[in-house]
Image (cartoon, grey):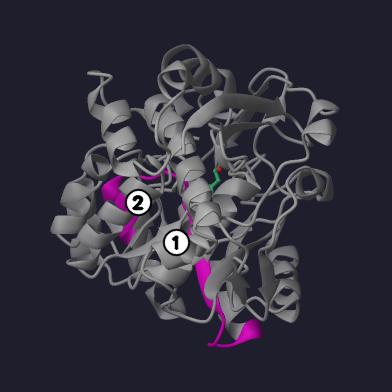
Amino acid sequence: MKITEARLIVCSPDRNFVTLKLCTDEGIYGLGDATLNGRELAVASYLSEHVLPCLIGRDPFAIEDIWQTLYRGAYWRRGPVTMTAIAAVDVALWDIKGKALNTPVYNLLGGRSRQGVLVYAHANGKDIEEAVDSVRRHMEAGYLAVRAQCGVPGVAGSYGVPKGGKPYEPAERGLPGEGVWSTERYLNFVPSLFEKLRVDLGPEVHLLHDVHHRLTPIEAARLGKALEPYRLFWMEDPCPAELQESFELIRRHTTTPLATGEVFNSVWDAHELIRRQWIDYLRMSIVHGGGITHAKKTADFAALYHVRTGFHGATDLSPVTMAAALHFGLAIHNFGIQEHMPHTRLTDEVFPHEYSFAEGYMHPGDAAGLGVDIDEKLAAKCPYQRAYLPVARKLDGTLTDW
Ligand code: KDG
Ligand code: MG
């Protein structure tokens, strides 16, 4: 089999997606997601100018060799643009191989390790009452794990809280919006949200919370300690993680489990975090972390240190990535949890898929390959629109981590 065509589909069915379609001389094609939120065309250009011409004529079964060629052969290594581009090619190749062998991708990764993939939903509210209500509604819809975010009094546009009752979607068309941030107000407030959640909703539901990189290590340590009575499933991205040893300080002070890595793009962003057991869950996703090939190696390394996966799964990761993550989560032993933020109906129509949700778990379906497709005609009716993630400023106007 040979790759005969490599095509990019850039579309915006309610939000932007970059999708790679690799076609072969045997009529089988594979899909890969190449979406990097707010930087979509950088990846598209990296792929079309530097990667796709090198794929024509290659054997799509040679996944490892193609991965190494794109990683080592570029000389310049890693970074979100490069690793997202490599991931798109890699995932499309796994899709092709599954279809060619007439088996779901999870069978190529070792086969099923479980019946379904535990997922967590996003709940939020402008105040505690609304947030508790939102968690309750997700529990009623069958979710066993729910991330709770809440407006912080005196902090306009708090992270994770939608405007005007719409589903939360951080990227906005036009130029970057600005939110406000106050660590002091946040730290004083958040424990009361989780206290109320436990009082009203009981001990069973898994509760998660995303700090979104906004604290220093000692502030995060204080928050982790304050949240211990409410037994969180995890506290996510307590501080920026470029300095991996920041987590040593947090870890020293709290037993609240820690998750990080949605902005990571290779095992090298996390190897100290894993090797020193400073985190419990790794969030680096298949789309931004070099694809299934690199995620498998990273997860196997993490398994040695009791670190489990908890992949990023916000709406900026397309249904192609969701499908790949579900095959992966069904197969590997050290799977922990998968984020599930449902796409809009239009996005689901552009990407028809086999995966499904029931009673807290998702399943990738048993179709050959990934079980996800793209309706190119519909995609063509939804042209790309420039969009940005917002930025955040402290009360005195200093730019801070969003
Ligand atoms: O593109 C950025 C979003 O995906 C991110 O802000 C969402 O933090 C996020 C999460 O945990 O889903
Ligand atoms: Mg996050």
Mark sitting on residue 295: 2
Residue behind label 1 places its C-beta within 8 angstroms of ligand 1: no
Residue 328 in percent (x, y) is at 44, 61
Type of residue at label 2? Answer: Ala
Residue 139 in percent (x, y) is at 69, 78
User: Which quarter of the picture shows residue 360?
Assistant: bottom right
Mark 1: few/some/many CA within 10 Å (<14, 14-19, 20+): many
Residue 94 in percent (x, y) is at 46, 49
Compared to residue 228, the image places residue 20 above or below, namely above
Mark sitting on residue 208: none
Compared to residue 278, the image places residue 173 above or below, namely above
Q: Is residue 79 left or right of residue 22?
A: left
- Asked whether 190 or 61 is in front, the reply is 61
Name the residue: 77% across, 33% down.
376
Name the residue: 63% across, 68% down.
365
| Cβ atoms under marks 2 and 1 closer than 8 Å | yes
Q: Is residue 40 visible?
A: yes
User: Which quarter of the picture shows residue 15?
Assistant: top right
Mark sitting on residue 328: 1
Q: Is residue 191 visible?
A: no
User: Which quarter of the picture shows residue 382?
Assistant: top right
- Asked whether 30 or 43 is in front, the reply is 30
Picture mark count: 2
**Which region of the structure is painted magenta?**
200-222
Residue 323 in percent (x, y) is at 58, 56
Is-magenta flag for residue 193?
A: no
